[in-house]
Image: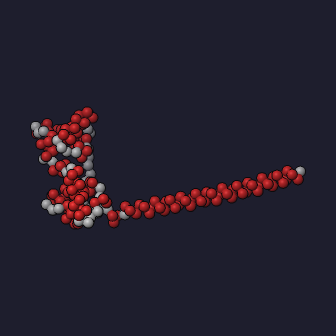
Amino acid sequence: MKNKKLLFLFCLVILVIAVVVFVRMNDKKSTKNQEVETNSSQSTDVFDKSNVINYSSETEVSYSYEEVTLSMEEIGKYREEIEQAGFDSTLFTDQEIQVMQSKIKKNGQSISQYLKDQPDKSIDETEIDKARDELKAANIDPDKMHNNEIVELIKEAKKEKKSVVEVAKEK
């Protein structure tokens, strides 16, 4: 009888120790999770508003898209023709390609003629790279800018007949 009581008491002590160890392990895990959350919130400070170009003065534009009625094969064909004309076909959405197709048929133009009349679409990778080099030379870090932002700077520079660096410094 004494052995059974002793065995029961021993099991009870082991159970208490196991519960204490389990609770402490969970506390360590939650502490680590809090540290990870703190580190991740600190890393998001890299994208603080002070590091982003302020577009608050620009008017927002909402787009409404028409349903694409061209087949994927036709869109693919037009994308190939755009590439052959020396332009980046990824600059166009499927909806824009559909509109382009209707305007080309209406005006009797070729794709290359139509695209040359579109100044916004004529910005290619070499022009973006050139703008990045100019910005680096002016001690402006272009690596903090996405290609879309640089394209916008190039467009604005062309419109205002200024250099990309001048436009970037104004912003």
Dividing the picture into quarters, in which one does residue 135 lie?
A: bottom left
- The outermost residue toward the left is 108
- Give the camera-side residue of 126 and 62: 126
Image check: 35 left or right of 163? right
Image check: 163 left or right of 4? left
Query: Which quadrant is home to the C terminus?
Result: bottom left
Q: What percent of the width, then of the height, locates residue 133?
A: 23, 59
Q: How many marks?
A: 0
State the residue at coordinates (57%, 58%).
30
Image check: 103 left or right of 54? left
**Eyeballing the image, is 49 above or below 110?**
below
Q: What percent of the width, then of the height, locates residue 131?
A: 22, 58
State the residue at coordinates (72%, 57%).
17
- Give the camera-side residue of 11 and 54: 11
Q: Is residue 105 visible?
A: yes
Q: What percent of the width, then of the height, locates residue 64?
A: 26, 46
State the residue at coordinates (67%, 57%).
21
- Give the camera-side residue of 62 and 85: 85
State the residue at coordinates (19%, 51%).
123
